[in-house]
Image (cartoon, rainbow, N blue to C red):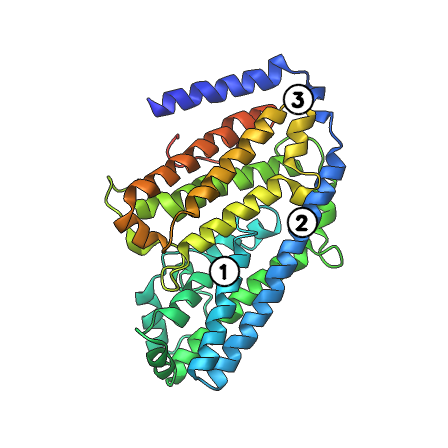
Amino acid sequence: MKNTIYLILLSLCIVSCTEDKPSSSCETVDNNAILQNLGNIIVDRYSQLNTQATLTQTAITAFITAPTTVTLTAAQNALKQLYLDFETVEMLQFGPAESYLQRTALNNYPTDTTIIQTAIANGITDLQNISNSAKGIHALDYLLFGVANSNTDIVNWYSATNNKNYLTAVMTQVKTVINNVYNEWNPNDGNYYNTFINATGVDIASAFGQLSNAIIADYEKYARDGKVGIPLGIRTLGVPQLNNVEGLYSKTSLQLLENYIINYKSLFNGNNGLGLDDYLNNVGRSDLSTQINNELQAILNTIDTFNHDLAYEITNNEAAVQTLYSQLQALLLTLKVDMVSAMCLTITYQDVDGD
């Protein structure tokens, strides 16, 4: 039934876009000015992520060189910030990010600790043939927070050379992927920025087409489902999957979700400059722009009511997490049906379950 309703809504969306509105209605905004601002935001986010990756690599190198609780804490703090900074670009899975498989290479959680431990035991440092579930930022989360029960024990664990070498190899892999994507966007290097801001229009290959598909697909599959729904048990008949939370070992799942939503909202509003909200405003849908902002803020307000990580809240405050999921679901329909229709765009990715 849900699939049927969704197909009807999507059909109405397409009819509304193609019949009720002249094609020029989606061209009444200065597309290039919006794209320039969004492009600058994206480049800035990748620049910050790349800088933090360098800082994290430096902190991890210092820890490996002199393993103490002090150097470990510094490395842990650097990694937490790197994970938070990754949330600012996670939804941008198109262009260079798609070319370098950014999401699967950097955040393919839950972490497969068995593969990691086997690779370490075998002295493997070439990660080319290692599963993405055993490398990336989420693997660093395990390697710096989850290999023992206390920081003192973690420091002792790194007395073994193979352990140090694998940590170094994963950090190098993370830095390489981030650096590659940033360089491709950088106007002074690969200059995908120029490609992006000049891909005007609303067809599938346009910047708006690629961006909208990327941010909605990521929101549906990796925010609504990955960050909340799957741990909550939405896909497992109500049985929670607590080990599937993001930031499992650092217990930062809700911080990561909050930063994701904050930056999703910021991107939508163009950092208070020209953004997708202005596109909607200029095609006569300021009501929809306001609705999206209100729904995003409602999600943030709910997150702010939690005091622990998501695994704890699911166990001890499940009803509130269910409310959070419902809010995430409501926003998905607003984005995927109403916003796409108003902007005369087309969804091309395959959804998870027809919701």
**Number of residues whose C-alpha sits closer than 10 Å to that of mark 2, classed few (under 14), some (14–19) or many (20 or more):** some
Residue under pointer 1: 83
Residue under pointer 2: 41
* Residue 157, picture quadrant: bottom left
Q: Nearer the viewer, mark 1 or mark 3?
A: 3
Judge by depth and name the residue closer to the eye, 216 or 78. 78
In the rendered view, tell whether residue 24 sits above or below residue 83: above
Placement of the C terminus among the 4 image quadrants:
top left
Circle nearer the N terminus (3, 2): 2
Judge by depth and name the residue closer to the eye, 217 or 268. 268
Q: Are marks 3 and 2 in contact (CB under 8 Å)?
A: no
Q: Secondary structure at mark 2?
A: helix
Q: Secondary structure at mark 3?
A: loop
Q: Are marks 1 and 3 in contact (CB under 8 Å)?
A: no
Q: Secondary structure at mark 1?
A: helix
- The amino acid type found where label 2 is placed reads Ile
Residue under pointer 3: 284
Q: Position of residue 182 (x, y in %)?
A: 64, 58
Q: Position of residue 215 (x, y in %)?
A: 54, 41
**Number of residues whose C-alpha sits closer than 10 Å to that of mark 3, classed few (under 14), some (14–19) or many (20 or more):** some
Q: Position of residue 253 (x, y in %)?
A: 40, 55
Circle nearer the N terminus (1, 2): 2
- The amino acid type found where label 1 is placed reads Tyr
Instruction: Residue 97: tell me if it is visible.
Output: yes
Judge by depth and name the residue closer to the eye, 33 or 15. 33
